[in-house]
Image: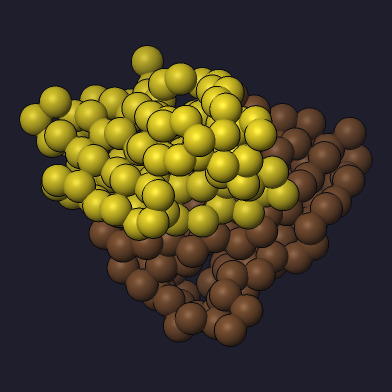
Amino acid sequence: KNEVEQSPQNLTAQEGEFITINCSYSVGISALHWLQQHPGGGIVSLFMLSSGKKKHGRLIATINIQEKHSSLHITASHPRDSAVYICAGSNKLVFGAGTILRVKS
Amino acid sequence: NAGVTQTPKFRVLKTGQSMTLLCAQDMNHEYMYWYRQDPGMGLRLIHYSVGEGTTAKGEVPDGYNVSRLKKQNFLLGLESAAPSQTSVYFCASGPLAGGRNTQYFGPGTRLTVL
């Protein structure tokens, strides 16, 4: 069993839908990272959070330390949101396998 | 600023050949990392460095060597490539250790070992 598990593995949504990607971890962490990887391969850091919630534009990340669970939400999804979303737990970064998101217009 | 750059972007090797991947960052970051990404698996840490002249093993170090002779550069070497090393390799850098701050990733190097 991986130390960081993501669900779903694949997600297809219609433009405008509200999307949730989940991340559960079994290791003690000091922070949880959400990353975005576009089809071209580049990886961008979206959020780093250790408690509560963070918001950036249409993206919202939450974390529940007691339940060892984090969620990434995308509101009003758009085809340009299509990417692989990866969560990672620190201290030493341990990565989930990623969620492949496709948003259809 | 160029951020984190990697060379080459693509490479095909035959089993047993050697090569070096170069990572360069212009953000004056202390910490640098090499990861590999394989289908269905998360990024896995190969080696990392906490500063110029230092290196340390990550989760999957076997078959790789690294050097950090200059703060801005982190080299990943494959002395005798094997098909199991076919992967996409990412370099990253950050101002603080591991998960305590944002890591900045390079564009990746796609390596195929025949």
Image chain in yellow:
A
Quarter of the image where the N terminus of chain A is located? top left
Q: Nearer the viewer, residue B60 or B23?
A: B23
Residue extending furthest toward the top: A1
Q: Residue B24: which quarter of the image? A: bottom right
Q: Nearer the viewer, residue A53 or B27?
A: A53
Quarter of the image where the C terminus of chain A is located? top right
- Residue at 51% x, 56% y is A44
Q: Residue B66: which quarter of the image? A: bottom right
Q: Give the side of residue B76 with respect to residue A48, left or right.
A: right
Q: Give the side of residue B71 with respect to residue A46, left or right.
A: right
Q: Nearer the viewer, residue B69 or B8?
A: B8
Whether residue A93 is visible here, answered yes or no, is no
Residue extending furthest toward the left: A66
Residue B3: image location, x then y, percent: 57, 75
Which hue belongs to chain B? brown
